Amino acid sequence: MSNPEPLTTRCLCGDTSLTVVPKSMEIGACHCNTCRKWSGGPFLAIESEQVSLTGNNVGHYDSSEWAERVFCQQCGTHLFYKLKDGHAHYVPVGLFAQQQDMVLSHQIFIDSKPHYYHFAEQTTNMTGAEVFAAATGEKP
């Protein structure tokens, strides 16, 4: 697969511009309680190592010991979830115009997913314990 082209978008009010270089066009779904509260459902995102922001209303919220969430303070648009070590940004796919080459490939915190929705796609699934084990190099 070739390297994806940069994607650019704006928040709802247009104040904040966001440009990302996706790691791939694979969409991940997070079902953890924090992501579901933040996004109002499963958090569907692409991963990017590079994010450029311009705007006067960018807000940051420390949502855990390891991550922060970035949003527009004017309109409330969720811009991305970022690991505090700075190596990964997870950007909501809904910010971008439909991309034909995006595909739902994996789900995390599958053990936290509520019973009332299911995805038809066959994906790689990880529990919360498996996610933290992968991040730390330990066995779940």
Image: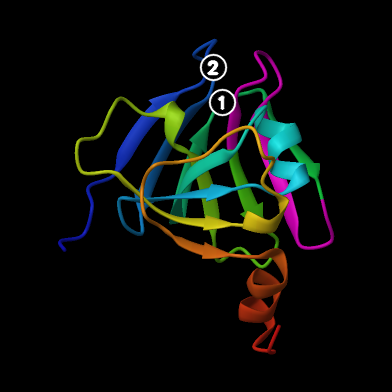
* Mark 2, secondary structure of its residue: loop
Vertically, is 23 above or below 133? above
Gap in Å between the C-alphas at discs 2 and 1? 5 Å
Vertically, is 71 above or below 15? below
Q: The disc labelled 2 sits on which kind of residue? A: Asp
Q: Is residue 109 visible?
A: no
Q: Nearer the viewer, residue 87 or 39?
A: 39
**Quadrant in the rendering for residue 101:** top left
For label 1, the residue is 55
Residue 100 forms part of the magenta stretch: no
Q: Image check: 1 left or right of 135? A: left
Q: Quadrant of the N terminus?
A: bottom left
Vertically, is 24 above or below 12? below
Label 1 CA crowd tier, 10 Å (few <14, some 14–19, many 20+): few
For the residues bearing labels 2 and 1, Cβ distance under 8 angstroms: yes
Q: How many marks?
A: 2
What is the number of the mark on residue 118? Answer: none
For label 2, the residue is 15
Label 2 CA crowd tier, 10 Å (few <14, some 14–19, many 20+): some
Vertically, is 17 above or below 82? above
Q: In this view, which residue lies farthest toward the top?
A: 13
Q: Is residue 61 visible?
A: yes
Q: Residue at x 48, y 44 (%)?
A: 45
Residue 74 forms part of the magenta stretch: yes
Q: Residue at x 39, y 42 (%)?
A: 120
The numbered mark, 2 or 1, whose residue comes first in the sequence reads: 2
Q: Which residues are magenta?
A: 64-79
Q: The disc labelled 1 sits on which kind of residue? A: Gly
* Mark 1, secondary structure of its residue: loop
Q: Residue at x 36, y 47 (%)?
A: 121
Q: Residue at x 61, y 63 (%)?
A: 86
Q: Where in the figure is residue 114, as x and y percent of width and height?
A: 69, 40
